[in-house]
């Protein structure tokens, strides 16, 4: 019984870490993705080309590799770029918060790339006629975007967004590779230290419940925008 | 004085010249119909007048005042006033789906009132709503004020689009094939609305394939072929007595279709 409570409290802590990682990633990646999206859609060719390359790399390489790259970036720079800087292998020191921030940065950048493509698909799917109707009525470009286009885009991107966001919850487990004490990390500890398997399945239940809650929430949101067709 | 004058308007897409020098003039309250075969440049002309395309050269005057003057290589700026002297009703309606019918009508005037920084916003909003309700009555859709576009038939959507365009009282209201994407039984209700606008002396330019309608509603008809005005005149002249060979071929081809 004591063991069960211990497992629960450790996993609870791990869940809170995962939750923070999830929330902060969203807070950063949602706006950053929009910025990336505008860059890839920019009429200024060098900018759109560069951002398309960045999106390609971020979506084309494993997230785990990106986590390592950011975590070991100082070491990599030290080896190849500025050997004399002698910064050591990782950021400054390897306290928990630095590792958390490294993971967060990797998640935010990676997910921003995915979000940017979802935004782009959403924006490009709106008919030209909507912009033109706005212009003919004397609206400014900004008014057209915020008063006419945005809500239609939001409606269209909710399904792919909810998919991506649900994937993110499970992807937070990748942070365990740089020793961020999230759910899977804690559960694995019980396996290596106490030889217990079931904490891992309990961790799975945490994810399931959280995904369930989000699924219901997205369903509600979708329903709320059901009053119009776009 | 002419409410609209267009001088030598030209538009190129890449290397192909789509409008090869269009001249036309229109008096207040007149209705001009534009007919012509597919690809002739009718839509492009309306889009240039509404500044959705940038004409490469030529001049547009509204009430004698130049609102657009382009020489090759320069892109003139279009003032809000110039933009609002024209209204456009699209073939595909282009209503804003997330807004109800009355909100579709009120959106632009409200944003305009906000931009002017009026202090008595509530008063102005009330006036805007009254105006919107009046126009909805005019197009026969009072009871649909709170419906959303997806709940309306094509004919009803197009009537809303007409009312929305009228909200800003454009000097010249343009229609690009307003009934072409409608089922035949729905064209009548839209054409009736347009006819009622003529009765209230609204200046209009109508691109249409409805020859009978053009004959009855227009004061002037122009036939556009390959980017030039091939022939222009009163409906009687153009439909009963076309001078140009091309016009004759076009009109008789239409008859054979039926
Ligand atoms: N954005 C564009 N880019 C390139 N070419 C265009 C563009 N818009 C129109 N065109 C070309 O310009 C010509 C005139 O087109 P327009 O749509 O004005 O004809 P229209 O008279 O309205 O024909 P329809 O009766 O089929 O509507 C066509 O050959 C068309 O292919
Ligand atoms: Mg056309």
Image: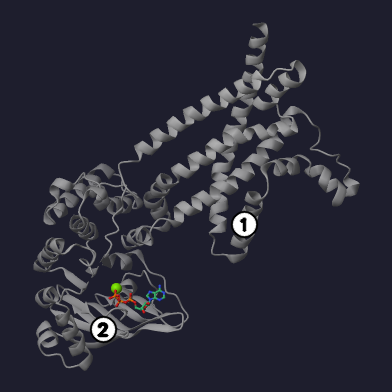
Q: Is mark 2 within 8 Å of ligand 1?
A: yes
CA gap, disc 2 to disc 1?
45 Å
- Label 1 CB-ligand 1 distance < 8 A: no
Crowding at dot 1, Cα within 10 Å, few <14 / some 14-19 / many 20+, comes out as: many
For residue B218, above or below residue A74 = below
What kind of element bears circle 1? helix
Residue at position x 72%, y 19% in the image: A190
Q: Residue furthest top?
A: A1
Q: Is residue B6 above or below residue B246?
A: above
Q: Do callouts 2 and 1 mark residues in contact (Cβ within 8 Å)?
A: no
By what rule are the colours in the image chosen? one colour
Q: Residues within 10 Å of mark 2 (few under 14, many from 20)?
A: many
What residue sits right under mark 1 in the picture? A51
Q: Nearer the viewer, residue B247 or B234?
A: B247
Determine which residue is flagged by label 2: B224
Residue situated in front as seen by the camera: B28 or B255: B255
Residue in view at x 37 percent, y 51 percent: A148
Please check whether the numbered discs 2 and 1 fall on a single chain: no
Is residue B56 something one can see in this rendering? yes
Q: Is residue B197 left or right of residue B20?
A: left
- Residue A182 visible within the image: no
């Amino acid at each position: 019984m004591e063991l069960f409570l211990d497992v629960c409290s450790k996993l609870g802590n791990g869940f809170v870490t995962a939750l923070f990682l999830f929330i902060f990633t969203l807070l950063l990646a949602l706006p950053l993705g929009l910025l990336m999206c505008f860059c890839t859609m920019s009429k200024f060719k060098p900018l759109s080309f560069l951002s398309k390359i960045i999106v390609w790399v971020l979506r084309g390489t494993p997230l785990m590799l990106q986590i390592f790259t950011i975590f070991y970036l100082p070491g990599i720079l030290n080896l190849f770029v500025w050997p004399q800087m002698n910064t050591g292998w990782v950021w400054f020191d390897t306290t928990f918060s630095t590792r958390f921030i490294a993971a967060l940065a990797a998640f935010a950048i990676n997910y921003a790339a995915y979000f940017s493509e979802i935004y782009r698909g959403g924006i490009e799917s709106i008919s030209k006629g909507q912009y033109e109707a706005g212009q003919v009525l004397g609206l400014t470009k900004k008014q057209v975007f915020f008063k006419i286009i945005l809500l239609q885009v939001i409606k269209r991107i909710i399904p792919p967004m909810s998919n991506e966001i649900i994937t993110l919850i499970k992807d937070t487990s990748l942070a365990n590779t740089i020793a961020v004490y999230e759910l899977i990390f804690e559960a694995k500890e019980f396996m290596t230290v106490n030889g217990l398997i079931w904490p891992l399945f309990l961790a799975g239940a945490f994810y399931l419940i959280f995904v369930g809650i989000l699924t219901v929430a997205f369903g509600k949101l979708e329903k709320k925008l059901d009053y119009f067709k776009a | 004085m002419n409410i609209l004058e267009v001088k030598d308007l030209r538009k190129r897409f890449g290397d192909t010249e789509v409008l090869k020098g269009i001249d036309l003039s229109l008096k207040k309250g007149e209705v001009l119909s534009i007919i012509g075969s597919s690809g002739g440049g009718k839509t492009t002309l309306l889009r240039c007048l509404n500044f959705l395309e940038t004409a490469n050269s030529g001049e547009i005057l509204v009430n004698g005042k130049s609102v657009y003057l382009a020489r090759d290589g320069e892109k003139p700026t279009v003032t809000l006033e110039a933009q609002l002297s024209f209204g456009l009703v699209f073939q595909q309606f282009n209503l804003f789906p997330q807004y109800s019918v009355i909100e579709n009508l009120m959106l632009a005037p409200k944003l305009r009132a906000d931009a002017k920084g009026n202090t008595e916003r509530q008063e102005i909003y009330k006036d805007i709503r009254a105006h919107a309700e009046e126009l909805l009555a005019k197009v026969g859709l009072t009871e649909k004020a709170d419906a959303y576009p997806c709940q309306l038939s094509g004919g009803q959507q197009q009537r809303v689009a007409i009312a929305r365009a009228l909200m800003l009282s454009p000097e010249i209201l343009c229609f690009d094939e307003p009934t072409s994407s409608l089922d035949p039984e729905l064209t009548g209700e839209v054409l009736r609305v347009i006819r009622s606008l003529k009765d209230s002396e609204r200046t209009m330019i109508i691109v249409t394939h409805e020859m009978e309608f053009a004959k009855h509603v227009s004061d002037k008809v122009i036939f556009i072929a390959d980017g030039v005005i091939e022939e222009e005149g009163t409906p009687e002249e153009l439909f009963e007595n076309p001078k140009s060979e091309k016009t004759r071929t076009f009109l008789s081809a239409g008859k054979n279709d039926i």
